Amino acid sequence: MKNILTVCLIMLFCHSNFSQSEEFGLWLGTSFYLGDLNPSPNKNFHKNINPALGIIYKRNHRNLRYSYRLHFMYGKVEAYDFQSEDPWQQNRSLNFQTTILELGAIIEVNFVKYKVGEMNKLNQTPFLFFGLAGYNFKPKGLYNDSWYDLQALSTEGQETSLNTTKKYKLNQLAIPIGIGYKVNVSKNLSFAFEAGARLLFTDYLDDVSKKYVDPGVLAEEAGILSPILADKSNNQVGDRNVGHERGNSELKDWYFFSGLTFTYTFNKKSECEQRFMRK
């Protein structure tokens, strides 16, 4: 009875002091894009998937149901109209590529209780995640074997007499959402697989959204390269494409990170936890 009482008192005293385990790790995976130049993932999923990598810091909540993490990820996305099976896209003949630098704050929600370091019970779980991320991108277009910054060229007339809208920002916010599965492989090492999408607030990840504008005015006000990279179509509508759709502004772009996480925990049990385990 005395031992039981002692254990209960220790549990009551230590409940709010149990340490939250911390993990540091490496993320290895792939990056992918959906948007105006790649609207059909079912047909083009295998095309233009690029390697991606990142680093992760994670803190696991003491109730074993949540984890909070910060991550920094690097990836590249790209797409080419000539790869499409759609004749309209093939005729449009646009392309782009951009690197993505992402800093994210994420909450992982475990389906079942999970504890880092456990090897029998509580050692694995599926999880959902969501959060907020800031990212940097800079779309480039290919012309004569060279890549040019598209945002600077105002390809849809931004900040010219054709379109008073400001140029889209290259630093923006995204909402990461996804699903994964994690498991402990040793007392200190954990492994996870996850697939995540980024909900964006821009349609210009690929520099394509609205309509073609007058190439003569564009050349005069934004530079000679601007109309060349804005309209690369093989055949014009009538004598030129001005006023016709260049992209679909009703749908925002997406990018995706999917991959494997390897994390290591350096935490040891607190003195309070050790006393409890001994009891």
Image (cartoon, helix red, strand yellow):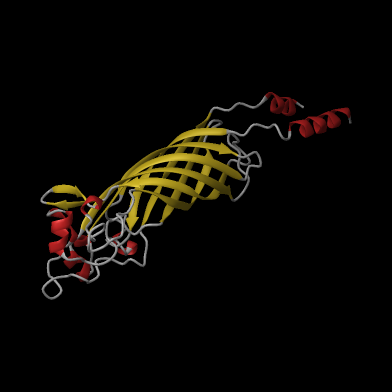
Figure quadrant of residue 42: bottom left
Nearer the observer, 65 or 132: 132
The residue located at (83%, 28%) in the rendering is 6
Horizontally, is 270 left or right of 78 in the view? right
Picture quadrant where residue 100 is located? top left
> Percent x, y for residue 213?
20, 65
Q: Position of residue 31 (x, y in %)?
A: 34, 49
Q: Residue at x 73, y 25 (%)?
A: 275
Name the residue furthest bottom.
238
* Residue 228 visible, this angle: no
Q: Is residue 128 left or right of residue 86?
A: right
Task: Reply above or below: 257 against 268.
Answer: below
The structure residue drawn at horizontal position 52% and vertical position 44%, both measured from the top left corner, is 182
- Locate residue 95 relative to residue 209 in the image: left or right: left
Query: Hey, which quadrant is residue 168 in on the image?
Result: bottom left
Give the x, y percent position of residue 24: 49, 33
Vertical relation: 60 (above or below) 247: above
Judge by depth and name the residue closer to the eye, 144 or 46. Answer: 144
- At horizontal 79% and vertical 34% (from top left) the residue drawn is 12
Instruction: Look at the image and tell me in which quarter the N terminus lies.
Output: top right
Farthest-out residue, front: 161
Query: Residue 34's spot in the image, x, y percent?
Result: 34, 58
Q: Quadrant of the C terminus?
A: top right
Q: Relative to the observer, which residue lies in front, 189 or 22?
A: 22
Residue 51 visible? The answer is: yes
In-front residue for pair 241/37? 241
